[in-house]
Image (cartoon, helix red, strand yellow):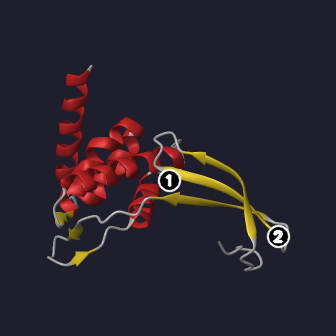
Amino acid sequence: MKCPYCGNLDNRVIDSRLSRDKTITRRRRHCASCEQRFTTYERIEMTLPMLVKKDGRREPWDRGKMLLGLEKACEKLPVSIEQLDSLVDGIERRLQDVGGKEISTSQLGEWVMEALPEIDVVAYVRFASVYRQFKDVNEFMDELKHFLGKEKKHD
């Protein structure tokens, strides 16, 4: 592993820990050259289905892109990066379970819409407003009414 500070390849692992769900290994490393410490994360790389966009384009799954979108939805809200990582981990598990070669981004959006209210309702509303591409306030209000109706059923 190349040191991010000096670029040297001579380093050693000083600590390793598994994530809660045992899918990611966090390693603390020590560079023999510059004496700096740094952290690396190791996860199993799996072949995931290609994403089919609304316009028909296909692109590979990008965990970073999903996290970035969720971070925007959760901006200035009390949502930790661990919560978002956990949500994206769940999406990745569902992608693995699908087993097909392709999946629509609409399906991904629906999975996020199912999971976000558990994390933060305001983040859900923000994500929904971008994901659903509301044409006017009435469409936005309809979505809120639908969401509030589901909330009352769960109480």
Which mark, residue 134? none
Viewport quadrant of the N terminus = bottom right
Q: Is residue 125 left or right of residue 41?
A: left
Q: Is residue 6 left or right of residue 127?
A: right
Amino acid at the residue labelled 1: Glu
| x and y percentages locating residue 76 in the rendered image | 53, 50
Residues at circles 2 and 1 in contact by the CB criterion of under 8 Å: no
Residue, disc 2: 32
50 up-or-down from 155: above or below: below
Q: CA distance from mark 2 to mark 1?
A: 38 Å
Taking depth in this image into account, of 70 and 139 the one nearest to the observer is 70
Q: Is residue 88 left or right of residue 144?
A: right
| x and y percentages locating residue 136 in the rendered image | 20, 58
Which mark, residue 75? 1
Are there few (<14), some (14-19), or many (20+) residues within 10 Å of tag 1? few
Amino acid at the residue labelled 2: Ala
| x and y percentages locating residue 38 in the rendered image | 72, 62
